[in-house]
Amino acid sequence: MALLLLLGCGSHPEEPARGSRRCTLRISARGIYVDGNSTTRAGAVASCKRSAGAMVVLEDNAPQDEWKEIEVELRREGIAIYMRGSVGHRECDDNPLAKACM
């Protein structure tokens, strides 16, 4: 009995611990960058998954279709999204960190 308590009563997979800081995900016409390093969409999601969330910076020339694809993947992975920069038609209530709302 003590052995069962020590080992647990079954397998409980744990999610990997996330860091305490947010990654900075920048999207522009030049590409995708995480914490200043050029990366792919998959690389950006993997990097931000290890953090406390993604601070997303959309430059004025950021391709909206690229952002939409990354947004879907971030949400699928349960990564918190915080926005900065041009965000289309979102209201300040939904996105208080947007440039126009600060």
Image (cartoon, helix red, strand yellow):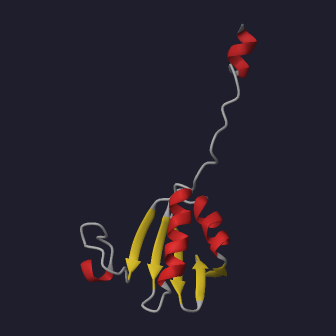
Q: Report the residue that reaches farthest toward the front.
A: 65
Of residues 89 and 78, the one drawn nearer to the viewer in this rendering = 89
Residue 81 horizontal side relative to residue 40, left or right = left
| Residue drawn at point x = 52 percent, y = 54 percent | 78
Q: How many marks?
A: 0
Give percent across and percent down for residue 36: 59, 81
Q: Quadrant of the N terminus?
A: top right
Query: Outermost residue, right direction?
Result: 3
Q: Position of residue 98 (x, y in %)?
A: 33, 77
Q: Give 24 or 80, whichever is nearer the viewer.
A: 80
Q: Is residue 70 left or right of residue 88?
A: right
At 61% from the left and 66% from the top, the residue drawn is 45
- Name, please, the residue furthest toward the top: 1
Q: Is residue 27 visible?
A: yes
Residue 102 in sight here = no
**Quarter of the image holding residue 39?**
bottom right
**Position above or below: 39 against 15:** below
2 is higher (above) or lower (below) than 39: above
Q: Is residue 100 above or below residue 93?
A: below
Q: Quadrant of the C terminus?
A: bottom left
> In percent of the image, x 56 and y 64: which residue is there?
73
Residue 40 percent location from the top left of the image: 67, 77
**Place of residue 70 in the rendered image (x, y in percent of width and height, measured from the top left):** 55, 71
State left or right for residue 9 relative to residue 27.
right
